Image (cartoon, rainbow, N blue to C red):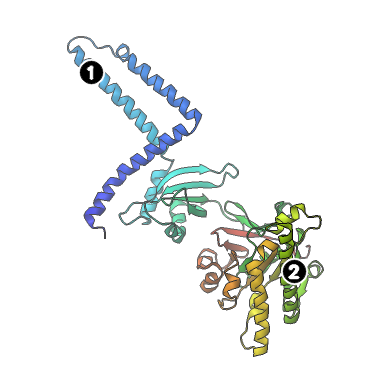
């Protein structure tokens, strides 16, 4: 425990640490670039000249000549030292740093002795002038507390936070944000020029700092959650539409008979409308996975991308999707035989979840059911991309492992989502009748 005397001692030393931090920060900024070194050399030269000719500028005469010369020299030393120190300090202190620290103090975002995080740098992104990058010295406040207090920090600093992550060491935190006056549009229409040229990068929507996307060649599986009317189904179809355009083979489980998918989807994708067909297709997919293992092993490559770079006959990606996975995997009220059939389906999905990435086989699953028992651990734990729209605490916890979707997305929002990286975005809307 830290008693009051120790707190007072630590707090009293805080101002001195701030001075040292900003002074050393200023030195680093000055000498980081050649221009800073040249200006420093010119400044030092000017100081030496000023010192050399100090008695010509202030001509000491009369009585006490030596004393007057000493006073002039001392004053000039003090002036040069003070100007140098203050200039370096100001260069090292980002604009608005004092106001930011004060605002964090006001909301009580401080460590155990009352020290607020200190702004070390503030920069504008070269590629997107809306994005501001703030680097803080944490003074012992862990990254988890920054995430837990994101809403309060946004309100205190009048910003929208896009990302919070650890800096160059565990004592610094980077906050990527935009000005609080910037707002996300409630409606953004998809256009063909948004389709990414990068290999299986799927574009999802617009966040505060720009386009939000996920590359399923690197992060292979996706889980989308959201209550009725949240836009979950539209986002799922947006993802699948891009997969179709990139040449993937798409299987969609829809036990409503495919009525939720307009006729054009039936020509571009394979709709699976009953358990037997679904199980048969999943077995064929896992058989293909085993076959691809042998193909890649023979070719001496680690994944489908390496294989396709040199292969004459390229392997296509396979995507299995389901708009409501609870309809497929829910065992409530089923007979033992029916439960066994569901367990077989679950087993095949588990294989794809665990092994699919290297072989170009992906899961894109969606649900609005707040039931943690629907997805077993092997499937859920191997899905790294989690996206949640408007939801209650339970569904948000299931999808994101926290209640942020419930806290940060308005109950009236449509098409607004939170990805598990912490980014909020507005999903693109597209006409699903024109695939």
Q: Position of residue 114 (x, y in %)?
A: 32, 54
In the image, residue 318 sits, relative to residue 32, either above or below, namely: below
Viewer-proximal residue, 82 or 338? 338
Q: Residue furthest bottom?
A: 335
Residue 295 visible to an observer of this rendering: yes
Residue density around tag 2, few if under 14, some if 14–19, many if 20 or more, within 10 Å: some
Residue 231 visible to an observer of this rendering: no
Q: Position of residue 293 (x, y in %)?
A: 71, 65
Viewer-proximal residue, 352 or 402? 352
The residue beneath circle 1 is: 70
Relative side of 372 to 156, left or right = right
Relative side of 207 to 312, left or right = left
Q: Position of residue 78 (x, y in %)?
A: 29, 26
The residue positioned 57% from the left and 73% from the top of the image is 377
The residue beneath circle 2 is: 288
The residue positioned 27% from the left and 50% from the top of the image is 10
Q: Position of residue 203 (x, y in %)?
A: 67, 57
In the image, residue 276 sits, relative to residue 402, either above or below, namely: below
Viewer-proximal residue, 169 or 79? 169
If you read the primary sequence from the N terminus, does the residue marked by circle 1 or circle 2 appear first? Answer: 1
In the image, residue 282 sits, relative to residue 195, either above or below, namely: below
Residue 354, image quadrant: bottom right
Residue 218, image quadrant: bottom right
Q: Quadrant of the C terminus?
A: bottom right
The residue positioned 65% from the left and 67% from the top of the image is 355
Q: Residue furthest top?
A: 62
Mark 1 secondary-structure assignment: helix
The residue positioned 78% from the left and 71% from the top of the image is 270
Tally the marks.
2
């Amino acid at each position: 425990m830290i008693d009051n005397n120790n707190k007072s001692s630590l707090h009293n030393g805080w101002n001195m640490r701030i001075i040292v931090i900003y002074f050393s920060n200023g030195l680093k900024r000055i000498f980081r670039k050649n221009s800073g070194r040249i200006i420093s050399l010119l400044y030092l030269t000017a100081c030496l000249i000023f010192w050399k000719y100090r008695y010509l500028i202030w001509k000491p005469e009369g009585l006490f000549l030596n004393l007057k010369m000493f006073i002039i020299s001392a004053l000039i030393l003090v002036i040069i030292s003070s100007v140098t120190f203050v200039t370096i300090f100001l260069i090292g202190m980002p604009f608005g740093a004092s106001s930011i620290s004060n605002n964090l103090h006001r909301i009580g975002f401080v460590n155990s002795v009352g020290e607020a995080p200190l702004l070390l740098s503030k920069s504008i992104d070269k590629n997107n002038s809306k994005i501001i990058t703030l680097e803080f010295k944490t003074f012992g406040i862990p990254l988890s507390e920054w995430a837990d207090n994101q809403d309060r920090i946004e309100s205190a600093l009048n910003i929208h936070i896009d990302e919070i992550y650890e800096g160059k060491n565990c004592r610094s935190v980077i906050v990527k944000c935009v000005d609080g006056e910037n707002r996300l549009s409630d409606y953004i229409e998809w256009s063909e020029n948004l389709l990414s040229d990068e290999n299986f990068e799927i574009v999802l929507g617009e966040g505060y700092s720009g386009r939000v996307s996920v590359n399923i060649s690197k992060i292979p599986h996706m889980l989308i959650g959201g209550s009725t009317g949240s836009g979950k189904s539209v986002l799922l179809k947006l993802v699948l539409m891009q997969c179709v355009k990139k040449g993937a083979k798409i299987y969609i489980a829809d036990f409503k008979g495919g009525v939720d998918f307009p006729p054009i989807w039936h020509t571009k994708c394979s709709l699976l409308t009953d358990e037997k067909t679904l199980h048969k297709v999943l077995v064929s997919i896992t058989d293909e996975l085993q076959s691809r293992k042998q193909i890649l092993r023979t070719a001496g490559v680690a994944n489908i991308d390496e294989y396709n770079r040199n292969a004459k006959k390229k392997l296509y990606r396979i995507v299995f999707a389901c708009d409501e996975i609870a309809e497929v995997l829910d065992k409530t009220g089923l007979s033992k035989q029916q439960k066994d059939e569901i367990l077989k389906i679950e087993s095949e999905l588990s294989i794809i979840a665990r092994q699919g990435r290297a072989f170009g086989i992906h899961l894109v699953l969606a649900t609005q059911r707040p039931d943690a028992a629907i997805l077993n651990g092997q499937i859920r734990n191997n899905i790294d991309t989690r996206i949640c729209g408007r939801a209650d605490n339970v569904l948000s916890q299931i999808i994101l492992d926290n209640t942020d979707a419930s806290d940060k997305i308005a109950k009236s929002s449509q098409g607004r989502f939170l990805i598990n990286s912490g980014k909020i975005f507005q999903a693109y809307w597209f006409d699903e009748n024109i695939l």
